[in-house]
Amino acid sequence: MSTNSQDESPVDGVEAELSREETDELLQEIERRRSLTGLAAFAVSAIGILFSVFQMWLAARSFTATVWIPLVGTLEISLQLLQANAIHVAFALVLTFLMFPASMGDGFVVRNLGKVVPAISSRLGEDNPVTRAAERVRGFSRWLVLDPTRSRVTPFDVLCIITAFLAALYFLTDFREIRDMRVFGVNSGRPLPEMFPLLEPVVGGLPILSDVSVAFILGVLGVLLVLEATRRTLGLPLMIIVAAFIVYARWGYLINSGTPFLGLLAIPELTWGSIIQNLWYNTENGVFGIPVTVSVQFIYIFILFGSFLEMSGAGQWFIDLAYAATGDRKGGPAKASILASGFMGTISGSSIANTVTTGAFTIPLMKRSGYSPEFAGAVEASASSGGQILPPVMGAAAFLMVQYTATPFREIIILATIPAVVFFFGVWVMVHLKATREGIGGLSDIDTVPVREHMKHGWFYLVPIFLLLYYLIIARLSVARSAWFTLVALTALIAFVSAYSEDTRGILFGILAAIVGAELVSHVVAGVAVTGLLTGASGTGLEIGQAAGVVVARLGWYAMLAGVVTLLIRPDLDAKYLELNPTVQKTAETAGEKTGRGLDDNQLFRLGTFVVKSMEEGAKTAVPVVIAVAAAGVIPGVISVSGLGPNLTSLLLALSGGSIVVMLVVTAIASIILGMGMPTTVTYIILISMLATPLVEFGIPLLAAHLFILYFGVIADITPPVAVAAYAASGVAKSDPFETGVKAFSLSLNKAIVPFAFVLAPGIVLLREKENAATLPIREQNRVVGFADLAELSYSVPEILVPVVGVFIGVVALGATVIGTLYTSVNRVERTGFALSSVLLMAPGLLSTAVFDLVGVFGVTVSPDPLVLDLTLRALGLVIFVVLAVRNRREAVIEAAQREGAEASEERTEPA
């Protein structure tokens, strides 16, 4: 698809889409990242690539690997989980201190400190020694920390990087001592003079350094580094929350246990040693706890998969596919924005990145078609936030849900699919009704190709996604293995397509056949691969069927090798079926210019640049996520070590008064407030640590409770006054940020109602109570439905089909309520009716339970059959909706007839 060039003038006063450079600059400004050049930029790239290589090694070989080194032999490499987690976080810390400035001079503290020297100067004079000393201190402090232009790495950053490196090195070199600390405590470790005798003359007389163990010192510094990295990447509020929990762990024992309500927060007294040991040297909780473990095993490799997919050019292809499908229809650009954001959800789980990347293209086109800047930005922000809840990839929080609920990821995909489809359908309905109301059509000046034609030139981008689903759902592989195999397949696919043309396809397939044949023979004869024969390995030959199975499993590697060999033969090949991301092309061109060898025209060099750039961008994308899970892990760590969990559950149950509606509303509000300006991952970790158990105690299925918290964490991204995704969209749309946030929230209202719907009617997320639920722990009483459940019509129709259909119809009613249009304008009374029908169709249990709780306050107990009541209320909602819809349709027909009559009358009265 082509549109007006970015260098051309705007059409109808609306600017063209943002360039790649403008998009990157906007993202850096929102995320407050540095724009580095020279050695610092090279360091970020090199460390980011090493980070990705390390994670790919873990994905391929787990924590143990055998490496063959020429002239040396085989080398056994083995890591413990705590060591792998520590390296993972250390990489993220180092990249954080390189990529994010400590201060740009615009913060509250720095601004107020900046007033000190002028105040001294005005009181004592410029030549006073005190004034000059203060000026020198100010100059040194600015040199040490300040980076106002986001362009230099400061000495303080270097100090933090060295400290992070030393903290990680300790895990590798002294792990036996760390294991002993689990029994004897963190203070049992060696002090600094004992570990480094040469430092005895220097630190021997200093109590802190000579008496305290190095493990304790590095643990304290490590926790402080995580807090500082949290402040830089995620903001001061989250750092304060995490620090407050650490302070609470030390001094929470001062709370009087006899105080009503607040006394439930009293905890036993903990020493700093036990706190640091649990927060820094533990994989059960703390910095290296479950969230970081999930990041090591699942999250990073999926982020890397998304980066490879984006750098391959899939992102732009998906956007073009969306416009090919809807661009010329009523409200086409907005509908294309929804589709494109949904497609991009398979690539990026970040609301902000999705909003800016997709919105740079879609928002200007929405504005050109007639949508207001605020509405255009709101559509993009709303749809982009849905990427975190859309299977098959979803956001990082979905992988945490796998670990916290001990549920296979394929089941998470199954239960999340219907609510996600409902959400995108709801936004689609609203933009369609808005287009109907405003008379907005498609864009005739967009040169789109038919969908079938577009699919011919990029169908292979869908292969990795289908492969991922196959590995997860059909082959039932683990999440990590599925992601790794899909990543290999994607890279092989791009290598193969890079080498494919009408001139080279014979060579390409011939080389592939030769490689496969040689491998097959090698396995049949010697039982090892060709590389094994070359290194002297041997084994027992396999039967032809077994050998074929081994070879087929490695077909991706063979295709990759065939593509590389073909490109070595034809380096000047032009891959007409592949258009890599502009970032890759620009990087290749820059490298070619610097070397002076014209490498930018070498297709093999471009392929290598694609791989390297994908690993670098994947690391950069992962850094805030890793810091987020490391910081957030402190909170469940404190709750666990302090024994706060049961008391917190009792407190919340007491405050809710036994009302499930109150509990759900409190959880929703807490999710939105806490999630404002914070990653969904952090919000999820904090809230499931505090609220998941109380929700389950009310009888809500465990998976539904977790998904409920996840949904409201996502809503926080588009909820004013913070609304980070809406703020990013307003930067692209040049719109008012607050109004954009308000509209984005209104477009996402169904995302706020649907969680109540599936919590009170679990059939919507395909959850069913087990037959022996009464004998099971409350957390294990539900399961994901199977085909046998669907075939049981007495269950599936009332418990699944009716609620799901009701939710979809309710979304249409909600659209009429929010937009004020169905077939024609809707007045206030009709809006009220549509709003009521929407609630009755989507979440009737919310209304009925609230009423029963209210009458229960007056001592009246009502106990109707839940299923009969649910079906009755949904039927009532349907009747209200149908009556209002039919009436609105008749009004639209009358208005159309009146317009036609008026136009005919005008034509008759015109002079001949």
Image (cartoon, rainbow, N blue to C red):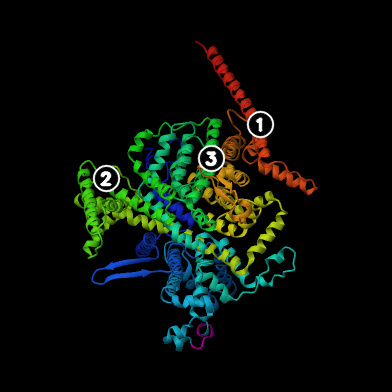
- Badge 3 or badge 2: first in the primary sequence: 2
- Give the Cα separation between the discs numbered 1 and 2: 58 Å
Dot 2 lies on which element?
loop
Query: In the drawing, does residue 299 fall left or right of residue 777?
Result: left
Residue 267 placement (x, y as % from top left)? 66, 70
Identify the residue at horizontal 59%, vertical 63% (top origin). Answer: 241
Question: Going by the picture, which residue comes out furthest to the right?
Answer: 858
- Give the Cα separation between the discs numbered 3 and 1: 29 Å
Above/below status of 868 relative to 538? above
- Give the Cα separation between the discs numbered 3 and 2: 47 Å
Identify the residue at horizontal 48%, vertical 56% (top origin). Answer: 31
| Residue, disc 2 | 575
Dot 1 lies on which element?
helix
| Residue, disc 1 | 880
Number of residues whose C-alpha sits closer than 10 Å to that of mark 1, classed few (under 14), some (14–19) or many (20 or more) = many
Number of residues whose C-alpha sits closer than 10 Å to that of mark 3, classed few (under 14), some (14–19) or many (20 or more) = some
Residue 158 placement (x, y as % from top left)? 43, 70
Please state which of the two labelled residues, at mark 3 or mark 1, is closer to the viewer. 3
Q: Looking at the rendering, which quadrant does residue 676 occupy?
A: bottom right
Residue 398 placement (x, y as % from top left)? 50, 53
Q: Is residue 207 magenta?
A: yes
Q: Amino acid at mark 3?
A: Leu
Dot 3 lies on which element?
helix
Q: Is residue 559 magenta?
A: no
Label at residue 790:
3
- Badge 1 or badge 2: first in the primary sequence: 2
- Badge 3 or badge 1: first in the primary sequence: 3
Mark yes or no: residue 74 visible.
yes
Identify the residue at horizontal 52%, vertical 11% (top origin). Answer: 911
Q: Amino acid at mark 2?
A: Ala
Magenta-colored span = 204-210
